[in-house]
Image (cartoon, helix red, strand yellow):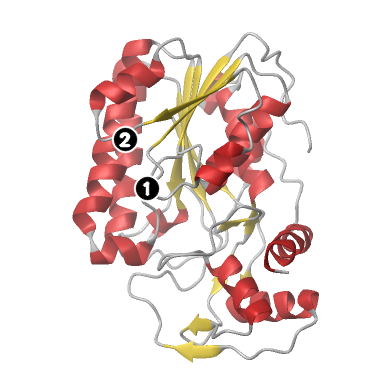
Amino acid sequence: MSVFHTKDISQSSFLITGGAGFIGSHIVDYLLTHGAKKVRVLDNLATGLQSNVDLFTHYPNYEFINGDIRDFSTCQSACIGIDYISHQAALGSVPRSVKDPIASNEVNVTGFLNMLTAAKDAQVKAFVYASSSAVYGDEPNLPKVEERIGNPLSPYAVTKKTNELYADVFFKLYGLKIIGFRYFNVFGERQDPNGPYAAVMPLFVSGIINNTTVYINGDGEQTRDFTYVDNAVQANVRGMLSDNPDSYGQVYNIAFGEKFSVNYLYNAIRSLLDIEHNATYRQEREGDIRNSLADISKAKRLLGYDPQYKFADGLKLTVAYFKKIYS
């Protein structure tokens, strides 16, 4: 694992909301591995996995709170004695938000506001949070630059845009040092392949290995800036520990800065597994962005973000991980 920080974190306490989730558990892993004084996870295990946090129980400086960010008193308790917060807890998935916009709003907006308020009251040193490239909506230009967004195409996108608005207000009004990350299709080990809203990459791998139907939405030529999870971890660590005053009150694209089609992704996975398996094409999904590619120059300039893993490197590691699980 690469080292993304230079500050001594042995006297610092961290709270990771959604720490039983895919990205959150990798952030927890990094902080524990590198000697943080305390790493506390707040998660209600609605979408996070117990197996993800079971990996950390042998660390004496690890603590787990089974709680819901929709409950303000839970958020307050979780923030006691905390220096830095990485807020990853959310109900992800565009299709889930289309089906149940109220649940997405309660978790992603009300829960976020609860955490912001609790963090402000606890006077934490810095607060970073997960936004999404979904915020770009119908803005057609590539690459995506932070200052130019369109209209949201899904309730999920609305919740993430609302997060950014609240974050801006808490930075300007209350002086909370806050940074947002617009993730672009993060993938990697521990991504959940199960359930109706599973991410595309583990679905492809499990379908090919198990010889079950793999669906590609639309013609498969839609493009994404697939981003290996370690790059997202780096952004969170750099954000929480940033010494650059200009880096706060900002939102950043977190990606690698390359785009690949879903068809290319599918064929690359098939090639790595060395298994012939044809996908089944179906109707494109409501609310999906057609093409996605990030300009990451702002994160490089203000945070020192320097993604270590190209798509091909991350894909090899990810496929090897799932191959071991399914074999």
Residue 61 shows in the view: yes
In the rendered image of this protein, does residue 154 appear above or below residue 56? below
Residue drawn where x is 30% and y is 24% of the image: 74
In this rendering, would 36 be left or right of 87?
right
Along the viewing direction, whichever of 256 and 230 lies nearer the viewer: 230
Along the viewing direction, whichever of 245 and 61 lies nearer the viewer: 61
Place of residue 221 in the rendered image (x, y in percent of width and height, measured from the top left): 56, 82
Place of residue 197 in the rendered image (x, y in percent of width and height, measured from the top left): 42, 65
Mark 1–mark 2 contact, CB under 8 Å?
yes
Place of residue 133 in the rendered image (x, y in percent of width and height, measured from the top left): 46, 55
Image quarter in which the C terminus is found: bottom right
Q: Hey, which quadrant is residue 297 in on the image?
A: top right
In the rendered image of this protein, does residue 190 appear above or below residue 24? below
Residue 261 shows in the view: no
Numbered-mark total: 2
Report, in whole angstroms, how far the alpha carbon at label 1 lies from the one at label 2.
9 Å
Q: Which type of secondary structure does the marked residue at label 1 adopt?
A: loop
In this rendering, would 144 be left or right of 205?
left
Q: Who comes first in sequence, dot 1 or dot 2?
A: 1
Q: Which type of secondary structure does the marked residue at label 2 adopt?
A: loop
Q: Amino acid at mark 2?
A: Asp
Q: Residue 46: which numbered mark, if any?
A: 1
Q: Amino acid at mark 1?
A: Ala
Q: State the residue position of label 2.
A: 68
Along the viewing direction, whichever of 224 and 230 lies nearer the viewer: 230
Place of residue 12 in the rendered image (x, y in percent of width and height, measured from the top left): 59, 12
Along the viewing direction, whichever of 326 and 309 lies nearer the viewer: 326
